[in-house]
Image (cartoon, grey):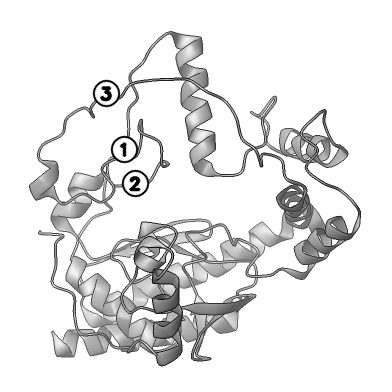
């Protein structure tokens, strides 16, 4: 199946406020967004997030399942994390550029204590920095240069892995190894271990540990309920579909088997139906990232009520999509 689909008619028109924000941003930022995968259709600008909800510049509220590509596991603006960040901003802490700090040590201890296979770590700001450093470390330890990169996934902005992000099969061709890039090692990061994100990270881990990790059980119960509901919906509608879920992360694939790799997914998934469903859900106040196959993410702020609303709107969106064709 060709993944280069014609985009359906927008179900949610770009509002005047969103359009104005994008136009203003585009004056100074190429394309108006600071990451190319944030350029979406419909062009919505969001202004507020709280718990499981986000609001766009027109004041419309959505149940959020995008979670900014998944980091908002506790929901938007979790009060416990917000309080921790506010405290550190008032405490006089700063990025000193020398020695270590108490918060850095506390964060490292929390991670090493609760992730059994982590013995030591370095605090960085982004996933790209982490994969970059991991590759450098692996090369130094193994004396090998080549890196295996999965197809269809994002692994960071650096040359070793910045390739093959949802590439159509017409361009990707058969399975093959990626090209090689010059390797000029350097290790630096001006803002690594900045006190605000470190404070937020500590507070997030503390929240996750509260009540013996009750937040994980809560999210898994919601995930199981959502998964069961989606199975029932596609069965009632006679759709060929499977639901893949791991904890809070899930995706509805319109194919007759769980995908095993990107070639399998790109060749069998109904991308057009997926995108029509997502746009219909957005119009109904449920925000799925409007690009086919993108992961959906529950948060600890979601409740059974929001999941039930989501299931109801999903069935309506799919039924509407099937009627329109």
Whole-number angstrom distance, CA of label 2 to CA of label 1? 6 Å
Residues packed near mark 2 inside 10 Å, few (<14), some (14 to 19) or many (20 plus)? some
Report the front residue among 238 and 165: 165
Give the mark nearest the N terminus, 1 or 3. Answer: 1
Whole-number angstrom distance, CA of label 1 to CA of label 3? 15 Å
Q: Quadrant of the N terminus?
A: bottom left
Mark 3, residue position: 180
Mark 1, residue position: 150
Q: Does the residue at mark 2 contact the one at mark 1 (Cβ under 8 Å)?
A: yes
Q: Residue at x 57, y 25 (%)?
A: 187
Residues packed near mark 1 inside 10 Å, few (<14), some (14 to 19) or many (20 plus)? some
Where 295 falls versus 58 (above or below)? above
Give the mark nearest the N terminus, 2 or 3. Answer: 2
What secondary structure is found at the residue carrying circle 2? Answer: loop
What secondary structure is found at the residue carrying circle 3? Answer: loop
Report the front residue among 21 and 2: 21
What secondary structure is found at the residue carrying circle 1? Answer: loop
- Relative horizontal placement of residue 268, taking residue 135 as reference (left or right): left
- Image location of residue 299, percent across then percent down: 59, 66
- Image location of residue 91, percent across then percent down: 91, 55
- Image location of residue 29, percent across then percent down: 42, 63
Q: Residue at x 51, y 11 (%)?
A: 141
């Amino acid at each position: 199946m060709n993944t280069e689909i014609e985009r359906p008619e927008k179900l949610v028109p770009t509002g005047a406020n969103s359009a104005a924000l994008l136009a203003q941003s585009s004056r100074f930022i190429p394309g108006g967004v600071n990451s190319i995968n944030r350029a979406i259709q419909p062009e919505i600008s969001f202004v507020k997030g709280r718990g499981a909800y986000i609001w766009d510049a027109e004041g419309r509220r959505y149940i959020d399942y995008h979670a900014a590509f998944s980091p908002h596991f506790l929901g938007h603006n979790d009060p416990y994390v917000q309080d921790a960040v506010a405290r550190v901003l008032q405490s006089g802490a700063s990025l000193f550029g020398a020695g270590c700090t108490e918060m850095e040590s506390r964060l490292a201890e929390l991670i090493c204590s609760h992730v059994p296979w982590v013995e030591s770590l370095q605090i960085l700001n982004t996933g790209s920095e982490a994969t970059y450093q991991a590759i450098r470390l692996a090369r130094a330890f193994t004396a090998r240069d080549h890196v295996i990169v999965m197809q269809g996934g994002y692994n960071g902005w650096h040359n070793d892995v910045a390739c093959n992000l949802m590439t159509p099969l017409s361009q990707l061709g058969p399975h093959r190894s990626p090209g090689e890039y010059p390797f000029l090692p350097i290790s630096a990061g001006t803002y690594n271990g900045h006190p605000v994100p470190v404070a937020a990270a500590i507070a997030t881990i503390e929240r996750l540990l509260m009540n013996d990790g009750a937040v994980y059980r809560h999210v898994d119960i919601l995930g199981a309920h959502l998964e069961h509901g989606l199975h029932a919906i596609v069965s009632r509608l006679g759709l060929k579909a499977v639901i893949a879920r791991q904890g809070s992360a899930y995706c509805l694939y319109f194919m007759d088997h769980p995908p095993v790799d990107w070639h399998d997914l790109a060749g069998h998934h109904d991308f057009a139906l997926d995108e029509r469903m997502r746009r219909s859900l957005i119009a109904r106040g449920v925000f799925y990232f409007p690009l086919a196959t993108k992961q959906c993410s529950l948060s600890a702020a979601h409740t059974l009520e929001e999941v039930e609303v989501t299931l109801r709107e999903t069935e309506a969106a799919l039924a509407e999509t099937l009627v329109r064709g």
